[in-house]
Image (cartoon, grey):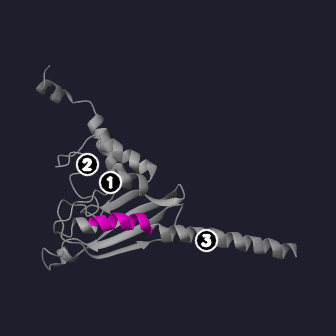
Amino acid sequence: MQKFAASAIAFTLFQFSFGAHMALAADATTPVKAIMDATVSNWAGGDSDWQDIFGEDKLKDIYSKDFGAKYEAAAQFPAADEDGISPFDYDVIVNAQDACPLEDVKIAAQPPKNNVTEVLATFKKLTCIGSDADYQKVTTVRFEVIEEGGRPVVDDIVTNDDNGNPSSLKSVMVDLVKQQQQPPSDQQKSANPQ
């Protein structure tokens, strides 16, 4: 009887654990949908206002604390853009400065691994340019979603460069800060005598 009870408890714990992981996987799409909805709206054309996917409210609600801290550090060094606040001079989701209205947008959570759920967002971003195969390619963005404070939040955004190499947005932000904090080279010092 004790064996049966132990087996029943173990099975119940397994179900609970599996259920919790499945719940995170299902909910993991929530912050990604918020980011993708804004991105789709931004590229839809028309007179709608640009939605900042890194606005203060979004940084608190849909990104991890670590991601938010890295963004705020990088934002101290804005890129040369109109708003003067973003550390990026391109859209980090479409991974470009220009895109067409996004088509065939799909969002799918993968099975969780090591407390991280990877959520894939796929879309076509250049279809308005032409029908050539290059303009019909599907772009994939990987969102790493973790649970923080009892809710799913995006901890990193990973895109691929033109050569197919993955690029972590958190790493890009850390590199931006490091580049800005490096002391000026001797050549820069001699060009600006004081």
Report the magenta stretch's main SS.
helix
Nearest to the observer: residue 29 or residue 173: 29
Look at the numbered discs 2 and 1 and tell me whether their residues touch, using CB distance below 8 Å: yes
Q: Residue under circle 2?
A: 86
Q: Residue, x 44% and y 48% (percent of image)?
A: 66
Q: State yes or no: residue 51 in magenta.
A: no
Residue sitting at x 21%, y 70%: 44
Residue that mark 1 sits on: 54
The disc placed on residue 18 is 3
What segment is highlighted magenta in the picture? Answer: 29-39
Tag 1 or tag 3, which sits nearer the N-term?
3
Instruction: Check the image and name the residue furthest to the right.
Output: 1
User: In the rendered structure, which amino acid carries the disc numbered 2?
Assistant: Ser
Which quadrant is the C terminus positioned in? top left
Q: What element does badge 3 sit on?
A: helix
Q: Secondary structure at mark 2?
A: loop
